Amino acid sequence: MYDSDIYNAIDTAIGNKSDIVFVSYSILDETDEKIRYTLQKIMEEYNREDWITPVYSAVRELISNGLKANAKRILIDEGVIKDTDPVHEIVRKLRTVLNERAVLEYGIKKKKKSLSTRVYFLFSPEGLIIKVINNLPLSENELKKIHDRIKISSKYDNIAEFFMDYPDPAAEGMGLGLCMVLTLLKSIDIDHNNFTFTTDGVEKTCAEMRISLN
Ligand SMILES: Nc1ncnc2c1ncn2[C@@H]1O[C@H](COP(=O)(O)OP(=O)(O)O)[C@@H](O)[C@H]1O
Ligand SMILES: [Mg+2]
């Protein structure tokens, strides 16, 4: 399929309010541009151009989390990361595969192992639902940690405030990214209850944003 066909297909899908899905294997792939285009078209339709950037930034962060979780799984399978590694060691090893060249290599490995991150744009009567799904489950413990982080982050209006309380988010394992997602949504008046994280415990983790448009 040519790119122009893809953009036409996106326009048609938005016109018909049909579901749209993008599949991503690495943060450098060409789906980014299409995701931004899709968001732009949808927001233009609702005269919400000012929402394009905050929502796109949130989606990108969630995609990168999904891709990172998948990359981490590969590193564990390859024995590069061990269960006994301290958190900072895991973060360091993950960083080495997230540099540009390695991202491509690991993107390819992920494709082989069918580890993907999918972005869904779903139209509902209330507005837009965006789901970012990566095909690995979360343990109960991991899910709880994420829920705790979301709860803490929801109290902040911007990441700078969060930084004051948690000056070293990586070391604290606090998660600057999720805080950014929440504050971005807050900045466009989307309450934190419209952002949820779920797992089926078997084969997927889903981050969902509900964006009311009318
Ligand atoms: N899709 C996901 N699958 C598994 N774990 C995730 C996912 N999204 C987030 N997490 C967990 O939540 C943590 C916090 O995410 P985030 O705030 O974006 O911080 P960071 O990406 O810097 O680690 C991650 O470190 C990871 O442990
Ligand atoms: Mg992140």
Image (tube, helix red, strand yellow):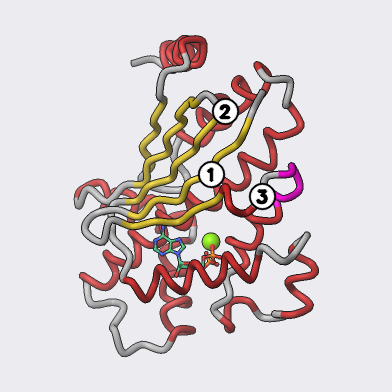
Q: Tag 1, which secondary structure? A: strand
Q: Residue at x 59, y 28 (%)?
A: 39
Nearer mark to the viewer, of 1 and 3: 3
Q: Amino acid at mark 3?
A: Asp
The span from disc 3 to disc 2 (Cα, nearest Å) is 14 Å
Q: Which residues are magenta?
A: 184-189
Helix, strand or loop: magenta stretch: helix
Residue topped by disc 3: 191
Q: Amino acid at mark 1?
A: Met
- The quadrant in which the C terminus is found is top right
Residue topped by disc 2: 127
Q: Residue at x 44, y 41 (%)?
A: 131
Above-or-below relation of 21 to 42: below
The span from disc 2 to disc 1 (Cα, nearest Å) is 11 Å
Place of residue 142 in the rendered image (x, y in percent of width and height, measured from the top left): 39, 72
Rendered image: mark on residue 209: 1
Above-or-below relation of 214 to 119: above
Q: Is residue 52 left or right of residue 204?
A: right
Place of residue 14 in the rendered image (x, y in percent of width and height, measured from the top left): 50, 16
